[in-house]
Image (spheres, rainbow, N blue to C red):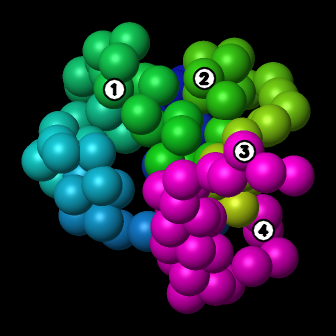
Amino acid sequence: MSIGKRIRKRRQELKLTQEDLASALGLTPQHISGIEQDKRNPSLSSLAKLAEELGVTVDYLVTGKEGVIVDTIPAIKADKKLSLESKKALVSLVTELYSIPRSNNK
């Protein structure tokens, strides 16, 4: 399976449209379509952003081998048991928690 086909498969598993994915990455839907049809190759930086947004590793997109996701947000996005709405809510919560300054008092 090609990179483009893995991207499309994962996007569809997450119930994202090409427009959703493009918007999240700052790309056009046409660019995403070109990548999924193997007419365009994603840049290395786009590949990293795609992997993060799709909740998979770059290694998975390139080789198809499953990888362990250690960051919180990609792990949430990769969880197949959560609904899209739940994922968005959790990502928003985690993002907010990351922005709160940590106290040095323990």
The amino acid type of the residue labelled 3 equals Asn
Residue located beneath label 4 in the image: 80
Q: Position of residue 20 (x, y in %)?
A: 30, 65
Q: Residue at the location (42% across, 34% down)?
A: 49
Residue 17 part of the magenta segment: no
Q: Residues within 10 Å of mark 4 (few under 14, many from 20)?
A: few
Question: Which corner quadrant of the image does residue 1 belong to?
Answer: top right
User: What segment carries the magenta color?
Assistant: 78-106
The amino acid type of the residue labelled 4 equals Lys
> What is the number of the mark on residue 104?
3
Q: Secondary structure at mark 4?
A: loop
Q: Position of residue 93 (x, y in %)?
A: 58, 74
Mark positioned earlier in the residue sequence (2 or 3):
2
Q: Secondary structure at mark 1?
A: helix
Q: Is residue 95 above or below residue 44?
A: below
> Residue lying furthest front in this view?
105
Residue located beneath label 1 in the image: 46
Q: CA distance from mark 2 to mark 1?
A: 10 Å
Taking the image as drawn, is residue 18 in sight? no
Residue 86 part of the magenta segment: yes
